[in-house]
Structure formats: C-alpha cells, structure tokens
Image (spheres, rainbow, N blue to C red):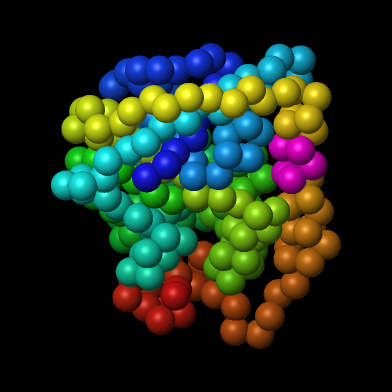
Amino acid sequence: MRLFHGSKNIIKFPIYGYGKKYNDYGVGFYCTENIDMAKEWAVSLEKDGYANLYELDVEDLDILNLNDKEYSTLHWLAVLLENREFETNSPLGFEAKKYIRDNFGVDYQNKDIIIGYRADDSYFSFAQDFINGGISYRQLCTAMHLGELGEQIVLKSKKSFDKIKFVGYEIALSDEWFLKRNNRDAEARREYFDNEKNSRQKGDVYITNIIDEEMKSNDERLR
C-alpha cells in the first residue's frame, strides 16, 4: 500500500506505541491513501506541514476493514465509542452507547491494520445526533458520505510498524490546505442540515427501534 501521513513534522521512522489513546481506533499510526486528505491534516492555521509518504508491505498482515460488506456503520460506531468521548444529553444516549458496544463490538485491538472512516468534527457530530435519537440510521449512513469523506488506514501492531518504509514527503502550505479542510467540513455540515437532518422518511429506523426490537448485526434493516 502507498500511504500518506499528515504531520507538522517529517516522520521517517513511525514509533510503535506512540500517539493519543483517544483517537478513533486508539493508539496507532494514522494514514490515508489520499494525499489531499493528508495535507489537510498536516497544517494548522498559521503553520505549514508535511504529507509523509510511505510504502507498506501488507503481506501476512491481519487487516480489519470496517468498510467491508460484512460490517455496518454501527460496527464502526462501536469502535468509536470505545475510544472517543461522546456527549450524551439523555438517558437514551447512555443506553444507546451500551447497546451498540455490547451488540456491535468488533475485536480490533489485536489486528495489525484497521481501515475505516475518519471521524472528523462534522462526522463525529452526526454520530452524536444518532446516539441521542436525533436522526435515523439511514440518515447517519448518508451523512457519513457527505463532503467526500475518505478512509483512514491505521497501523496498530509492532508487526505492521516493522513493514512500513518512508519514501519521501511533500510540503503542505497552510494558506492552501487549512482553507480546503475547513471548506470540506463546512460543506458536509451544510449538506447535512439542508438535506439530511430534517428529512425523515417513512420506515426510518432510529436508535430507539434498534434497542427496543433488539436488532443485531445480521438484521437486514441495518445494511
């Protein structure tokens, strides 16, 4: 795989076990196959950054791809709930978090690589709305594809770190990429509020339906 990692630094040797434990999938080295996405996340308001380029030999690596057809958005959400702090403003929110973790949890900690959505600020807020009963499951799934959200590839194991090789980097200019990042997030939010949040349809499944009817991962309504 050809991967990019956006950072304020040039990182020739990614360090296993280093990083924030409250990232989407816990501690790991977070990458993307999209150089534009890496450049967006490399910069801050007034500081340029780098899109570090790597080659990863995936042979013999155990890869969990949460975007495979055997998984649903709720499996991704279950992993997110284990690592990120969700604001729950009602008893429903607390019950929803427990139900999703208990029934859609995924054994991801022992994987070498995880592939899945990246919970940017806007997408994280969509998930919070679903947890708190504000939007349906269909609306959540649609919202996750607003703003051209890309996949992230996360190295989790020592084995995967041993198989990644630094190739080079490209400079990401703050003046260009910070604006693009903000515009993409704003566009996703705008589409969400204009077209999705208030577009309930007959037959929509909400978190209350999922809990009350004890829906599981093999339920066709969640595909």
User: What residue is drawn where x is 63% and y is 32%?
Assistant: 39
Comparing 222 with 20, the one in front is: 20
Which residue extends farthest left? 60
The relative height of residue 81 versus residue 51 in the rendered view (above or below) is below
Residue 48, position as x, y percentages in the image: 69, 17
Residue 182: which quarter of the image? top right
Residue 96, position as x, y percentages in the image: 46, 55
User: What residue is drawn where x is 37% and y is 78%?
Assistant: 219
Left or right of 74 in this view: 186: right
Left or right of 186 in this view: 117: left
Residue 33, position as x, y percentages in the image: 49, 44
Q: Main SS type for the magenta part?
A: helix
Residue 166, position as x, y percentages in the image: 39, 25
Comparing 124 with 85, the one in front is: 124
Residue 146: which quarter of the image? bottom right
Magenta highlight range: 180-185
The relative height of residue 212 versus residue 114 in the rendered view (above or below) is below
Residue 35: which quarter of the image? top right
The relative height of residue 127 versus residue 133 in the rendered view (above or below) is above
The relative height of residue 91 versus residue 135 in the rendered view (above or below) is above
